[in-house]
Image: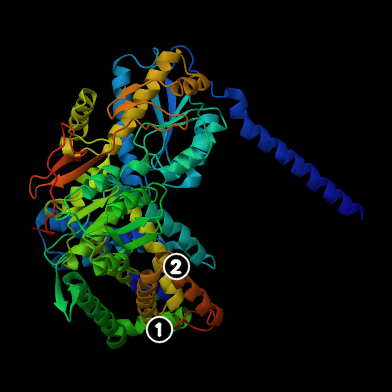
Amino acid sequence: MNQSRRLFRALAVTSVAGAAMLMVVTTSGASGSSGNNPPAKGAPVKIGISLSLTGDFSADGIAFQQGYNLWAADVNKQGGLLGHKVDLIVKSDASSTTQVVTNYESLISTDHVSLTFGPFSSLLTEPAARAVDRYGYAMVEGAGGAPSVFSAGLKNVFDVALPVANSLVPFATWISSLPKAQRPKTVAYATSDDPFTEPQIPVAQKIMSAAGIKTVYYKVFPAEATDFSSIADNVVSAKAQVVVLGSVDVPTVQAFMQAFEQAHYSPKAFIATAGPDQGAAFIKVAGKSNADGVMVPNSWYGLAANAASKAMVAEYIKKYGGTPAGVNADVAEAYAVGQVVADAVKATGGFNNAKIIAYLHSGVTFKTVLGSAKFNALGENPVMTAYTFQWQGTTGNKFVQVNPVGDPNTVKIEYPKPVWGK
Amino acid sequence: MATGLTLIFGVMEIINVAQGILVILGAYLSYALSVHWHIDLFVGLLITIPSLFVVGIVIERLFIGRLKGPEKTAMSILVTYAIALIFEGVLNYVFSLNYVQLNAWYVNRSFPIFGIYIPYIELFGFIMVVVLLSALYYMLYRTRFGASVRASLADQTAAALVGIDVRKVSTICFGIGVAVTAAGGMVYGTTTAFNASTSYDLISRLLVIIVLGGMGSLGGALVAGIAMVTIEDIVNVWSPTWATLSFFLLLILVLSVRPQGLFGKPTARVA
């Protein structure tokens, strides 16, 4: 009995001590900084970022890193932020929702960063924003536009890019406005159950259904699926004249395109929510002739007329090579994050995250490489214009803006889409 | 791919977690030969298969062959995982993280049979698999070396006692197990855009296939592989969400009734 009591006492003491230690560890960063962790005089300002340098989002993660690095180099050339050189501390999250949280907690508690920039993808941004919110940090990001990010009730998250749900609106509006003789009669939707892709489909479907374009196939597949042959075969069997694909990466788009070509099925229009916007990375996999006619929604492309964008693209090509059309949109989104944070730091005169968050919510308009950014109460950027882009040409592929109709930079859309491989 | 993995386990009781990344290595080798030297993908196998055989021999000699004792199998997971990480890092450095896909005239084209289009690559891939499995079968059942392999598969100690150089057999089997990934990698690379990170999807599937088929059973790996693809594709028609799950449900069902898998040995082997 005495032995039991001693054991119980030992266990109780250990549990209490352990819990106390845990509390100290998890709150030390928070109580120590409360979102205010300025750099020492003359020291660089540390900015913490978790990026998907491996895993499913690795290609986008690398592009984001390139964009952040370009911004940091430009800012440092001009003397840094308020005289402090910028030092980006990047940790890889392997595209994992748990690792991204661990990374930001470590960046704040251990590395004592003054600011944080967002990760890639809505899937990772939501848990990341929650994590940094506990420490009072702002999270300005360029790849977390899904409704789930903004319905979490967080006040610290700001997306410089287009709200995701509206991405397909210009495409849906255009195709619905075609004369009846040209307008397609059927459409197939296949989407990953990713928070980025899934919200876009119902919005587009509503517009197209109202115009009499009948849904002949609708399928949601798991984000972790790697074999799309059955789904693609079902799309082929449905004989839809338009295909809307909710994809997050190049391999998914390529898998469907390959299946369609093997089945000798060529829809009149084919749009994917992501993948074709990855520039040279998409062409390398899809091939120049097959890319012809493929469309993608986005808020930016490498030939954008924006002067800041042109300068950034020139720097990118000087450092990494390639052509303007080949520049991944992720690069611009990351760069824009840096621009917004830099403006907020200058305007507030310091690195206090609470003041930065208040400033970002104040209704001020920022000028970025993506265009204007002005955040609503949720942190979305509703002023960002949604565009549709299309690859045109079979040898010297051009990535051109085809929507919204009437925009001075919009060119004629290639419709119907050329047959695969021709 | 699974055949190589199960052969390695059957002879050496090594779980080669690096099999996935070695498939990707095979795919990248085919890619390099195709893009830089314009060698056809199937012709390139004459280079990539022997190359990966050598890679397998080197890995076995440097790392795997040194594992001994009752913890050998458990340690093999750690060692081969480390090897996988090294290869992943090297491939990322050499080829970057951008996705690539193997291309040739037969990759996207197909021909009709009774109204169904059959992709050329699937037909050629099937023929290649038949040839490779036939060669493997011939090696195992018509050669002295094959007899040594089968003896080692049955009982390593007894094989050693009758004068079989089990160490040499193990080394060569590891090499063969890795060499077949060249062929698997080439076909995989024609149907899927890949980078080094995609190896994680592969190895999880390969391990499940060899567990269902029975660890060490080549026929089991073949049957389980066909079962996996067939079940997933059929269920995919109704529900992509249930497709992968249905295969795992089958795995649980089979293991509940036959813990050794479909064609595995009913009793545990003593090292």
* Label 2 SS: helix
Residue found farthest to the right? A1
Of the 4 image quadrants, the one containing the N terminus of chain A is: bottom right
Q: Which residue is at 18% across, 28% downward?
A: A305
Looking at marks 1 and 2 on the same chain, the residue that comes earlier in the sequence is marked by 1
Residue A332 point in image, percent of width and height = 28, 32
Residue B39 point in image, percent of width and height = 11, 61
* Label 1 SS: helix
Residue B50 point in image, percent of width and height = 22, 67
Which residue does the numbered mark 2 point to in the structure image? B242
In this rendering, does residue A93 appear at all? no
Q: Nearer the viewer, residue B151 or A161?
A: A161
Q: Nearer the viewer, residue A420 or A13?
A: A420
Instruction: Give the amino acid at mark 2.
Output: Trp
Which residue does the numbered mark 1 point to in the structure image? B151
Quarter where residue A263 is shown = bottom left
